[in-house]
Image (cartoon, rainbow, N blue to C red):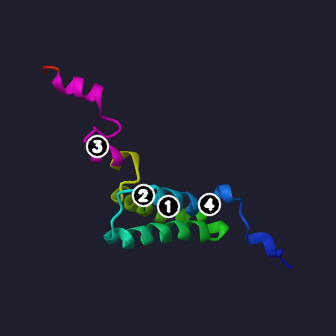
């Protein structure tokens, strides 16, 4: 007989609560963003709800999709920088100096 609690996981292993906090913190969401918000929550739930032996596969399948939705909603550093008109991470002052240097 298996333990009834064998499906329990430490809350630190879950991504859905963090996604929920992130979505709640977004102040620029409009009513038409509802479907994207729901999709992000479902991707996070799919990752968290995957059986232990399938979690890595679920993360590989749904992780990039979740990240894409969060980016579209403006919830990633790259998306926030783009909205502010800043250079995305990985470019910046050094890249600008290199681009300005004569060839």
Quadrant for residue 81, please give it. Answer: top left
Nearer the N terminus, badge 2 or badge 3? 2
Q: Is residue 31 above or below residue 27?
A: below
In front: 30, or 37?
Answer: 30
| Local SS, label 4 | loop
- Residue 87 inside the magenta-drawn segment: yes
Crowd rating for badge 2 (residues with CA inside 10 Å; few <14, some 14–19, many 20+):
some
What residue sits 65% from the left and 57% below the top?
A: 13
Q: Are marks 4 and 3 in contact (CB under 8 Å)?
A: no
- Residue 84 inside the magenta-drawn segment: yes
| Local SS, label 2 | helix
Question: Mark 3 highlights which residue?
Answer: 84
Question: Mark 1 highlights which residue?
Answer: 60
Nearer the N terminus, badge 4 or badge 3? 4
Residue 32 picture location, percent across and down: 31, 71
Q: Quadrant of the N terminus?
A: bottom right
Question: Mark 2 highlights which residue?
Answer: 67
Question: Mark 4 highlights which residue?
Answer: 14
Nearer the N terminus, badge 4 or badge 1? 4
Q: Is residue 7 left or right of residue 86?
A: right
Crowd rating for badge 3 (residues with CA inside 10 Å; few <14, some 14–19, many 20+):
few
């Amino acid at each position: 007989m298996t333990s009834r609690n064998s499906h329990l996981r430490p809350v630190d292993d879950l991504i859905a609560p963090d996604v929920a906090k992130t979505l709640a913190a977004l102040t620029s969401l409009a009513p038409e963003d509802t479907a994207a918000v729901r999709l992000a929550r479902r991707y996070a739930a799919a990752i968290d709800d995957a059986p232990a032996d399938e979690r890595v596969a679920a993360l590989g399948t749904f992780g990039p999709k979740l990240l894409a939705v969060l980016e579209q909603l403006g919830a990633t550093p790259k998306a926030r920088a783009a909205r502010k008109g800043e250079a995305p991470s990985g470019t910046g002052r050094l890249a600008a100096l290199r681009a300005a240097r004569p060839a």
